[in-house]
Amino acid sequence: MKLILLGPPGAGKGTHARILSEKYHAPHLATGEILRQQIREKTPLGRKAKDIIEKGGLVPDQIVNAMMFQVMGRIGTEGGFILDGFPRTLGQAEALEDFLAEEKTKPDTVLNFQTSEKVIIDRLSGRRVCPKCGANYHIRNIPPKKAGICDSCGEKLTQRKDDEPETIKHRLRMYESETKPLIDFYAKRNLLKDVPGDYDVPELQAELASFFDELKLVK
Ligand code: ADP
Ligand code: ZN
């Protein structure tokens, strides 16, 4: 399964990508997670990305492309991929197209998460993350077993700096200007599939399962 998940921040890409990755055994490549990992490990790349991410900006194409192609080159594309948060600009989409052409492959489909602003703001403002292992929660939709504590590792949960209201607004503006043009880019290539991002998780998973059946993506 070779998927690209497209959509605004808070659209549900990460949540669905994690489930699909387990269900269909395709590697989940979340650009934001990889970048945050670099920040936690204080690598040179992490140092460059930290300020940009905390302010809700986009890390330059050159850096993100090199990072993603390194990861994809290492694991290979034969086992499939679920790209979550990449590409996010036209420059990234073009570079990815070239990279995949060299690998003699292309995405099966691009899922375009259509999520309303109200739902986005609720999801992002209620999101809590584990600073140690990166697990994600939501105060109402996906609460941890014990309030404020990570189920997997017991660490105290925190709120991402870029989930503060002003930063959320900036990220949504970046989505509108930089990422939205990708809808057209993939529609022109007949790869776009709109999906209802406002649905709750099991509902949307069911819809995706029947779409993958139709596409004969899963044997
Ligand atoms: P969200 O999708 O909710 O914005 P992510 O975890 O995917 O969250 O991304 C967090 C931040 O990481 C982004 O706001 C941006 O600063 C940076 N980032 C992630 N993916 C990319 C990308 N493809 N290009 C540039 N910056 C990125
Ligand atoms: Zn944890």
Image (cartoon, rainbow, N blue to C red):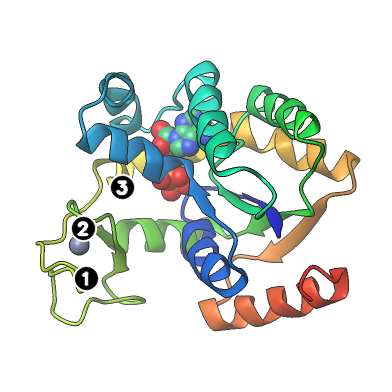
Residue at image location 52% in from the left, 77% down from the top:
201
Q: Earlier in the sequence, mark 2 or mark 1?
A: 2
Q: Is residue 39 above or below residue 79?
A: above
State yes or no: discs 2 and 1 in contact (Cβ < 8 Å): yes
Residue 163's tag is: 3
Q: Quadrant of residue 214?
A: bottom right
- Which secondary structure, mark 3? helix
Give the CA distance from mark 1 to mark 3: 22 Å
Label 1 beta carbon less than 8 Å to ligand 2: yes
Q: Earlier in the sequence, mark 1 or mark 3?
A: 1
Quadrant for the N terminus, please: bottom right
Q: Earlier in the sequence, mark 3 or mark 2?
A: 2
Which amino acid type is marked by label 3?
Asp
Observer-nearest of 152 and 12: 152
- Residue 115's spot in the image, x, y percent? 59, 60
- Which secondary structure, mark 2? loop
